[in-house]
Image (tube, rainbow, N blue to C red):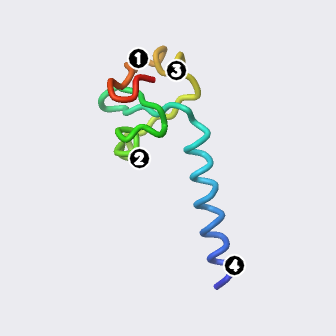
Amino acid sequence: MKKFLALIVAAVVLMTANVLASNYVGNANSKKFHYADCSAAQKIKVSNRVEFSSREEAVRAGYVPCKRCSP
């Protein structure tokens, strides 16, 4: 049981680190991008979530900046 819990904790830590590593998050439906910590970004469904490492990358992909967080 302890090994199972340790694996669960490790998986959560890795997923959290992966999300925090991307600076910008886009919504595939709205084509808007946000800072990763924007409240609007937190509401994006996983299936619609697109991660970008830079603002330029998001703009090149055709995404427009969020008006709330102004990335």
Distance from label 3 to label 1 (Cα)? 11 Å
Quarter of the image holding residue 6? bottom right
Q: Which label was assigned to residue 55?
A: 3
Distance from label 4 to label 3 (Cα)? 40 Å
**Residue at image x 62%, y 49%?**
17
Distance from label 2 to label 4 (Cα)? 28 Å
Q: Position of residue 51 (x, y in %)?
A: 51, 34
Closest to the camera, between mark 4 and mark 3, is: 3
Which mark sits nearer the N-terminus, 2 or 3?
A: 2
Query: Which residue is more in the foreground, 57 or 24?
Result: 24
Quarter of the image holding residue 63? top left
**Quadrant into which the C terminus falls:** top left
Mark 1 = which residue?
A: 62
Kind of element beneath mark 3: helix
* Amino acid residing under circle 2: Val
* Amino acid residing under circle 3: Arg
Within-10-Å neighbours for mark 1: few <14, some 14–19, many 20+? few
Residue reaching furthest left? 30
Q: Which label was assigned to residue 3?
A: 4
Which mark sits nearer the N-terminus, 3 or 1?
A: 3
Q: Which label was assigned to residue 46?
A: 2
Distance from label 2 to label 1 (Cα)? 19 Å
**Quadrant into which the N terminus falls:** bottom right
Quarter of the image holding residue 3? bottom right
Within-10-Å neighbours for mark 4: few <14, some 14–19, many 20+? few
Which mark sits nearer the N-terminus, 2 or 1?
A: 2
**Residue at image x 48%, y 14%?**
60
Image side of residue 40 versus residue 25, left or right: left
Q: Tell me, yes or no, whether the two marked residues, 2 and 4, touch with CB atoms within 8 Å.
A: no
